[in-house]
Amino acid sequence: MDRKVDHDVVVIGAGFGGLYALHRFRDDLGLDVRVFERGSDVGGTWYWNRYPGARCDVESMFYSYSFSPELEQDWEWAERFPAQPEILAYAGHVADRFDLRRDISLETSVVSATYDPEYGTWLVVTDRGEQVRAAYLVTAVGCLSSSRVPDFPGMETFAGETHHTGRWPHDGVDLTGRRVAVIGTGSSGVQAIPVIAERAAHVTVFQRTPHYTIPARNRPLRADEVAAIKADYRRYRAESRIAPGGVPIFNPPVGSALDVAEQTRIEELDRRWEAGGSAVMMTFNDTALNREANEVLAAYVRDKIQQSVRDPRTATTLTPVDYPIGAKRICFDTDYYDTYNRDNVTLVGLRETPIERITEHGVLVDGVEHAVDVIVFATGYDAMTGPLNAIDIRGADGQLLRDAWSAGPRTYLGLSTAGFPNLFMITGPGSPSVLVNMIVSIEQHVDWVCDLLTHCQEYDVVRVEAQLDAQDRWVDHVNERAAHTLYLEAASWYLGANVPGKPRVFMPYVGGMGPYRKTCDQVAADGYPGFTLTPRRGDGRPADAGSTPGTALPAQESL
Ligand code: NAP
């Protein structure tokens, strides 16, 4: 690439997406790549989320890169579900093993990125005042990296410590013998509460909506099972790439929840409940689609809650009743419900009586002040669009991305958005991302962008832009697929419902990893229909820059 640029590609973020993008773009395509990362180390979400109990709920043997057979053979995972320190160590190992650190600028946030239509380059500005030009901008900013603390009145008056789970101090927080409030009971709260309860003098949990949670049954991995997977890793990886969830299917559904004989239904659910992890959610093939079928699974989990929690009032408060199981992201836990049987744990339901205010000494609900020393905000994220909208990304006509998306994100394939040429989003809205194994999603996106950049090199294309009509059709398709599911029946972060004022748009693509991959592969095989590919003119600028009339490649049939 010989445009007047400092780098061929700027990548924002050095989490799993950014690391892999750097490796592929630099080491396979030979491009000059610069990565900006706001943390002081690589690892992305696993760098920031150091709260007690933080753990991935995709199994470690599959929540790992597949691109290097040597890496996957060498790395030894300790547990079925990897804990945050182990995943962070893995990210660091990858960075060292592939010599990635030399092209990563740490503790550097990108504050703006502006496309210059005349020269066909992105001008990227960082919070350190550095300005660099790049031909391509790739965002690998994560889907859940804009942490959110609700605007509770009185926050500034609290005399104790406050911590968000996604911004946990790196030298830890000693909670031993302290009174701790945990606000929020999504995946982060569900993981943190049992671990905090073991140390704290008292834990008061503030719960707005009860979440459904299923035992993870985490345990050390056995040498024989690791050896068996490693012996057949290539096959498992191939299966993961085409599986709907991006992981091999060990427990396929037994059929419709409404058709299966009662005996089979109970036996299967019990077996899967004991197996732990995602198996329970996979029991039937229609629980994501049919409310009656969903109710079979939901009722089973509700019974488990009633059986686990001794105090009937607490059990009732913990039991979700008014939304389908899976419509908010399912949680996987270790001893979550049992924790409420401890003497040092109190549950405060907020459904009828929200938090009134934070006081100097604690949290006020329904006129009662719950005195605490520490408040843990497990209150989630401005998901998917938050991290992108936080950067001033300006497209070809000067429009800000956040303005272009003011009514909700609009992308073509979740990879690209009209008006923002040469910008590619890794696991952007409109792609399966958060609904599937993120690492499989990341590898698919980066590989696809690599193929596109290779195509651009081959055909001397300097500008790639999603076409508006292709984007409109993709957004319609994403919405239409979501509308056939039960996802729309819960106020979830998938829909932006957790952020006041955020447009209610179902952001990820529910079509599954395999079908989505097929669609993306087809677009590549067909010469990128739905994208306008603009070749270089004599002076290296895009052919339609300045006064030269556009000479975009012939329009191809769109998706
Ligand atoms: P979350 O699922 O959005 O949960 C936030 C919690 O805070 C919810 O219980 C929410 O209640 C509550 N909350 C928000 N605003 C509130 C308010 N004003 N008053 C009272 N309660 C309030 O966030 P998260 O637990 O951090 O998880 C986010 C996502 O990160 C997960 O869904 C998952 O995708 C990912 N994650 C994964 C893992 C893992 O792999 N194990 C672990 C952690 C996180 P409502 O439900 O009523 O809104």
Image (tube, helix red, strand yellow):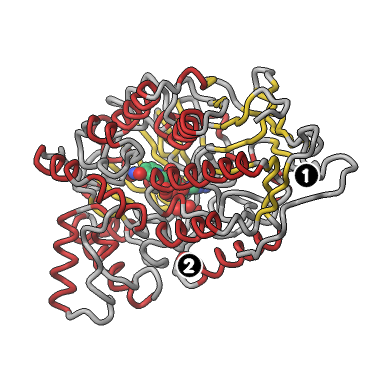
Look at the picture and state if 108 lies above or below 455.
Answer: above
* Amino acid residing under circle 2: Glu
CA distance for labels 2 and 1 = 33 Å
Q: Residue at x 33, y 45 (%)?
A: 190
- Between residue 199 and residue 259, name the one nearer to us: 259
> Quarter of the image containing the N terminus?
top right
* Amino acid residing under circle 1: Gln
Relative image position of residue 364 (x, y in whole percent): 48, 42
Q: Residues within 10 Å of mark 2 (few under 14, many from 20)?
A: some
Relative image position of residue 452 (x, y in whole percent): 57, 45
Residue reaching furthest to the right = 547
Q: Is any part of residue 548 visible from this angle?
A: yes
Tell me if the residue at label 1 has its CB under 8 Å from ligand 1: no
Q: Is residue 461 left or right of residue 255?
A: right
Q: Residue at x 26, y 41 (%)?
A: 60
Q: Is residue 275 left or right of residue 328?
A: left
Q: Is residue 301 left or right of residue 506?
A: left
Observer-side mark, 2 or 1, equals 1
- Label 2: state its secondary structure: helix
> Quarter of the image containing the C terminus?
bottom right
- Label 1: state its secondary structure: loop
Task: Read off the residue under disc 2.
Answer: 489
Q: Is any part of residue 152 visible from this angle?
A: no
Look at the picture and state if 178 lies above or below 216.
Answer: above
In the image, which disc is placed on residue 89?
Answer: none
- Between residue 253 and residue 154, name the one nearer to us: 253
Relative image position of residue 77 (x, y in whole percent): 22, 34
- Between residue 312 and residue 14, name the one nearer to us: 14
Pick whichever of labels 2 and 1 is earlier in the sequence: 1
Look at the picture and state if 371 lies above or below 231.
Answer: above
Task: Read off the residue under disc 1.
Answer: 399
